[in-house]
Amino acid sequence: MKRVLCNALSPLRWVFVALLLAALAAPFAYTAVTGQEIVRVDGESMVPTLHLGDVLFVGRAEPDELVPGAIVTVEPPGSGRYTHRIVAVEGDSLTLRGDANAEADPIPVAFSDVRGVVRHHLAGAPAVAVLALDTLPMRLSLVVLLIGLIFLPLPVRRGRGHVAPANLDHEAQPTTRREARANVLP
């Protein structure tokens, strides 16, 4: 039992366990600490600035940040959530336009419909990784892998202890650990 416990504490195994825990906790920790929301770009209205599949980190917007040029994520009533650039501010409403669109959006958006300002964005492989970590199947896979790394014992190392030399009568050699332990010299 001691050997199994010693092997279970292998430093390399615990490095992988720590990395898996960090991967599982990172999206939750980031949003909890920064208060930002992770949003996936699911359209092409903001090309070339934002592309389909990019990941946005959207933080709460202060009124002084709602200025022309800022990229905001909004969710007006009766409409889905989308991300566009502010082109004009008129009173307590915003006129938005996607970078790929020739004209501004036809309906202004109220300040109260703004979910937040885009603080950062990821593209390519990092965006794919963040999106993958944010899915239930990937999280379940990582949890199963984590449990396996913690609880499955590593193979017991051979060669510890003294095994009696082979019999000169050419008798059968021990084939199991139990048989080998039976031949250990006192």
Image: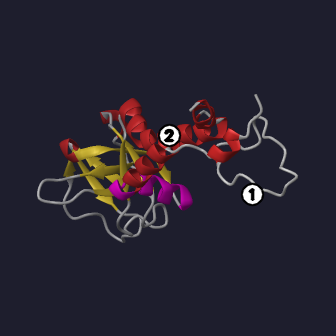
Left or right: 76 in relation to 88:
left
Q: Position of residue 118 (x, y in %)?
A: 40, 47
Labels 2 & 1 near each other (Cβ < 8 A): no
Left or right: 18 in relation to 75:
right
The N terminus - image quarter: top right
Q: Residue furthest left?
A: 78
Q: What residue is shown with label 1?
A: 172
Q: In 3D space, how far apart are the residues under numbered discs 2 and 1 (Cα atoms)?
A: 38 Å
Secondary element at tag 2: helix
**Residue 130 colored in magenta in the image:** yes
Q: What residue is shown with label 2?
A: 150
Q: Residue at x 75, y 57 (%)?
A: 172
Q: Position of residue 29 (x, y in %)?
A: 41, 35
The answer to whether residue 181 shows anywhere in this view is: yes
Question: What amino acid is found at the position of numbered circle 1 in the picture?
Answer: Ala
The C terminus - image quarter: top right
Residue range in magenta is: 124-137
Above or below residue 135? Residue 120 is: above
> Around disc 1, counting alpha carbons within 10 Å, would you say few (fewer than 14), some (14 to 19), or many (20 or more)?
few
Question: What amino acid is found at the position of numbered circle 2 in the picture?
Answer: Ile
Secondary element at tag 1: loop
Badge 2 or badge 1: first in the primary sequence: 2
Of 157 and 54, nearer the camera is 157
In this picture the colour scheme is secondary structure
**Camera-nearest label, 2 or 1:** 1
Q: Principal SS element in the magenta part?
A: helix
Q: Position of residue 168 (x, y in %)?
A: 88, 52
Q: Residue at x 35, y 68 (%)?
A: 43
Of 74 and 15, nearer the camera is 15
Can you tell which quarter of the image residue 40 is in? bottom left
